[in-house]
Each structure stands twice: as structure tokens, then as C-alpha cells.
Amino acid sequence: MTDFDPVIGLEVHAELLTRSKMFCGCAVVDSTAAEPNSSVCEICSGMPGSLPVINQRAVEYALRVALALNCSIAETSVFARKNYFYPDLPKGFQITQYEFPLATDGWIEIDDPSAPVSSKRVRIRRVHLEEDTGKLVHRERHSLVDYNRSGVPLLEIVSEPDLGSADQARLYSLSLRSLLRYLEVNSGDLEKGVMRFEANVSLRPAGSVELGTRTEIKNLNSFRALSRSIEYEIDRQATLLRSGKPVAQDTLGWNEEQQITVSQRSKEEAHDYRYFPEPDLPPLHIDETWVEQIRADLPELPAVKRARFMSEYGLNAYAAGVLTAERSTAAFYEAAIESSQGTSPVKIANWLSGDLFGLLNEAGVEIDQSKVTSEALAGLVALVETGQISAASGKAVLDVLFAEGGSPESVVEKEGLAQVQDQAAIRLIVEQVLSNNPDQVSEYLAGKPALSEWFVGQIMRETRGKADPARVRTELDAALLALNDQEQSQSGR
């Protein structure tokens, strides 16, 4: 798009992995599987006279995220009532933070291959705590409400409008999901709605600094929906502006079936929600000693780990990004290196991110549930790299390990996959293949050197892929050279 620059900011809502809800003792349950309204009390259902109490663990998890996002932590933050009426909001208001949030002014780096430099810094405006709403279930002409999710701790992360494309918005969201999973505060399971995105999109004339009228796309629950809805909205707004029509400040929904945004209501402003301090909750005072303790307990974060993998293990940026996207994958990789006794970290990375990832994705299995242990993968790579088995046999061994577990050595012995190293035995097979294919030998000697690859294939087939390719090549080259010398001698006689 040359005539307009997209300006995009994201609001990300992430449920926190606490055992109880934000302001009551009800258990947090899987709202997609639990019996409807089975984890509800007078507080999270908004009964008159009930009083909320702040969940300390939720505050701790929120602080972990805010610190990882390089935010400034407020010494005092205040909960507020956000007033609006909707069937999934039992109290008629939501307890959230508005004027005095928990944390502000942070940033996160994202990798953007399209940017002039390899990374882009996205500013974080605010990080604050609130409670989730219930869930509506629509059946034919009726709508039912399940309050199991009502009151679940929810973290809202609001970016500045620093994103310039749907791809950047997707990369930002992926980076944020990875960070939350590293911190073990959110499962990242978008299918269960534990992370939801809202995109604010506007256009301005190329090169201008003045912001255009924005629209907000609500309740996006997949990276695909996020990307496609933003792309559609950019095109829709550009079409309006080019025809001289204004963009209305609307709240939009995404119609997945039709792949279009649809207007839901005119965009609200803050005064429409009539925010005021929650009278039943005191201001939240954060002790600096507690903050520093949480900071000290933070794990090595994805961006730092990615840089270390590149410098320490010699990985390129892409491989390092793949292996550090999930904390469990990075731990598996480093455990494999530790047990490898000198095998190339790059070779282990290639087998892990290529062959093992392929099996995991096909089976829908997480790496920490795999029957292939880090020690087994390292041992398998060592067998291939030292020539004890061929690369093709290595893939066959990995298939068995993935299905049954065990050690690569035992699979190699059981399946008879050990590579033939005996030079004399390979020499005999080479001579046999050449003897059995005189026409191809004649063509080779007549000036078709490419046939040497055909001979290699025949030899490997005779050995069922077990012969050491390097030794096969050595013996074949020697045999063909001898035949060529013999041919030259006979023709010159």
C-alpha cells in the first residue's frame, strides 16, 4: 500500500493460570469442558452484598509479565468499575483497572524479516488486571449463559500503535504468547479462548504523522483470524478513503465464514463506561522488595535465549527462533547437547527442528510428551554423524523411537541397520554391480560420467542402504578408474 500507512495497536487479554478466581475462592475450571455454572459463587455471580478479595497469586503473575515486558511497576494501582450491561456480565459492571494500572511504559522486541533491521521494538502502553466475563452459548432461538469463566483473572496488555501491518501484528502476538508460556502464567491454548486479541486499525496518508479514524476488531481468538481481519480492514478503509468517504469509528466483529468485518456498535469512549474506583477494594500497594524477588525469579526469556543459542551453539537466527519459541523445546535441545558428548549442536538442531518436529506435528504431540528422549535424539545423531548408520537408516530409527521409545542403539541392533564398514565386503559388491551391468559400464566409459550416481544407487540397493556411502564412493571410483585405464590400454594397443 503506497498511498496509506496502516497504524495498528493491539489489546491482548490473557487468562492467568491461577487455581482460584480473581476475587473469590471458586476454582478456575476449563470453561470448554466443565459442567456449565459448576464453579460459581455469590461473589463471581454478582449477588448483592458479596465482597471481592484480591487474588495475590494473580497479582504475582501479572507482575512477572510486566517485568518481562520491561514495564515500570506502579507503587499503587487502583481497581475500578467499568459499567456496561451484557448477559455474560452478572454484576452489570466489570472490575478492572483504568486510570491507575498495575504497570506502564514497557516494550518487547519482535523479529520482522520485512523491517530494515531484523528486529522491531513495540512499545507497551499498559498492563493491568481485571476479571473475565461469562460465556454465552447460542442454541437455535435461545441463548444460554455459563458463568464458570466469570471472575477468572484476566491480564490485559495494551500496545502503542506501533505496528504497521497484519504480519507485524501476528509476529507481536506470537512473541507475546511465547513470553506468557515461558513465564508459565498462561497456557497459550487459543482454541480454549485463554488468549483473545482486539485490534485497533486506522490509516493515514503515507508519510503523515496524524492518526486517522480507528476501528476496533473485537474477540479474535486465532492468529489467522487476527491477520485476515486486519488485512480486510486495511483494504476496506483504503477503499472508503480513496472514494472520499469517511471511516466511521466502529466496534467490529470478524465473520469467519464470510471473511469480512461487520459493525457491532459505534465505538465507545472511556466516558461511556462511567469508570469510577471500586468501592469494595482498597488501593493495591506493591512492595518493592516483592517486585525485586519476582524479578530475580524470572526465567531466561525467549529473546535472550535466542541470542545465546546463536552465539553459543552457532545457530542461525531462524533455527534459534524455532528452538526457543517454546521453553520446553529449548530445554529439550540443551539437554540433548549436554548428553551428546561432542556432537555438533547444529546437527542436533537440524534433526530436532526437522525430522522430530515433523513427527510431533503429524501426531499432535507436545515435545515433553514424546517417547523420544533428548538423550535418544543425541545418540541417534551421533550414530549418523560417525557413520555407524546412514541418514536414511537414522530416519527409520527415529520413526521407531517415536512410536516405541527406547535407545537408538537397541533399535539399530534389532532392525539390523548398522552400516557396512568392511571395505573388502563393499569392494566385492561394487565389482558385482559393475559385472552385472556391462551396458551401463560401456556407456560410462564412452563419456557418460553421470552414470556413476546410478551405480551408487544400485550398490546401496544391494546393501539395503547399509553401506557407508563414503566407502562406496571410494571403491566405485577406484573400480571405474581401473576399468577406464584398462579401456585406454586396450584401445592404444
Image: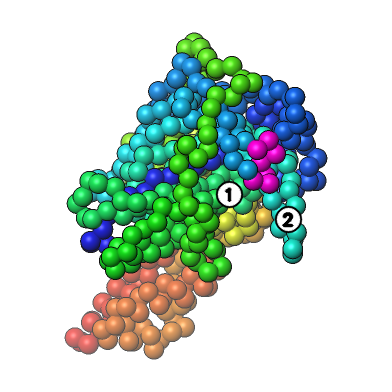
Count residues near mark 2 (Cα–Cα under 10 Å), then give few for <14, some for 14-19, many for 20+: few
Q: Earlier along the polypeptide chain: callout 1 or callout 2?
A: 2
Give percent across and percent down for residue 406.
66, 47
Residue 413 position (above or below residue 67): below
Residue 274 position (above or below residue 435): above
Tell me which residue sits at (60%, 27%) in the image: 58
Q: Left or right? Give the position of 484 relative to 349.
A: left
Depth check: give the residue in front, 260 or 457: 260
Give percent across and percent down for residue 374.
56, 41
Picture quadrant of residue 149: top right
Rounded to the nearest whole Å, what is the CA distance between mark 1 and mark 2? 23 Å
Q: Left or right? Give the position of 313 relative to 283.
A: left
Quadrant placement of the N terminus: bottom left
Tell me which residue sits at (77%, 37%) in the image: 39
Main SS of the magenta part reads: loop
Tell me which residue sits at (49%, 34%) in the image: 338
Q: Are marks 1 and 2 in contact (CB under 8 Å)?
A: no
Q: Which residue lies under the disc numbered 1?
A: 190
Residue 418 position (above or below residue 161): below
Count residues near mark 1 (Cα–Cα under 10 Å), then give few for <14, some for 14-19, many for 20+: some
Highlighted magenta segment, given as a residue range: 86-92
- Look at label 2 and name its amino acid: Ser
What secondary structure is marked by label 2?
strand
Tell me which residue sits at (56%, 34%) in the image: 82
- Look at label 1 and name its amino acid: Leu
Q: Is residue 10 visible?
A: yes
Q: Disc 1 vs disc 2: which is toward the camera? A: 2
Depth check: give the residue in front, 223 or 481: 223
Q: Which mark is residue 143?
A: 2
What secondary structure is marked by label 1?
helix
